[in-house]
Amino acid sequence: VNLGYGEINEAEMLPVSSIQTHDGNFIYGTTEGAVLFNPLKYDFSEYKAPMIFMSINLNGKYDAKVLMNINKQLLNDKKIVLSYNQNSFELQFIAINYRNQNDLEYYYTMDSGNAAQWHHTEDASIRFINLHPGNYVLRIKSISRKSQKIISQKTIQIIISQPLWNTWYAWAFYFVVVFIMLYFFWNYYLNRIRQVQTKEKINFFINTSHDMRTPLTLI
């Protein structure tokens, strides 16, 4: 008798060829022999479902080459770098296990330096709208509905670049421009003060000279 232990392949089972023993075991007849199965000793939650990122779709119209480059970053599983106007997108992923696909549910959190808060998603996709420029860490996990055990997890860094006018070198340029303007304004102010002081000195000497000549004229 070819007696095996393990998973039951329904395609190989013979119709009406099963029996339950007194100790709770089930024996199923197959085309390759019999399979002994005890549901009390079998942990249905113990299975693997590796998670992979599938694709990213940007809101709006973008060149196919742009999308291809971004999806290439996604498949490398390291980080995604997006421009400030690509801050609305949909990320698709999947935990691969065909047999237990209906047992999987997904949760995600986007960490930007704050406390992590997990959100449930009904399908294997997440949509983000108008993310502010900055660095984010996206964490996704798949959980078994039956056992509530974590089956697989995935993490990826997402960088939304600053617009050109808000980069550090743009602010350095603004600082230089403001400094130059203040410098010229200050010099202009000082020159005006010097001109006023010079004019007052000239008027003082003129008035003093006039006052000294007046008594001499009377004499």
Image: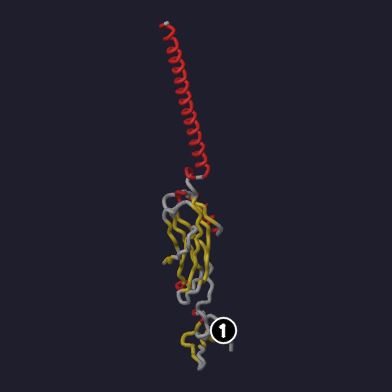
- Front residue of 33/187: it is 187
Residue at 54 percent of width and 85 percent of height:
35
Is residue 213 positioned above or below 131 on the image?
above
Expressed as whole percent of the image width and height from the top left, the position of residue 13 reads 50, 83
- What's under tag 1, amino acid-wise? Tyr
| Residue topped by disc 1 | 5
Disc 1: CA contacts within 10 A as few (<14), some (14-19) or many (>=20): few
Q: Tag 1, which secondary structure?
A: strand
Q: How is the image coloured?
A: secondary structure
Q: Quadrant of the N terminus?
A: bottom right
Is residue 127 positioned above or below 36 on the image?
above
Residue most extreme to the bottom: 22
Is residue 200 positioned above or below 143 on the image?
above
Expressed as whole percent of the image width and height from the top left, the position of residue 150 reads 51, 71
**Residue 67, can we see it?**
no
- Front residue of 183/18: it is 183
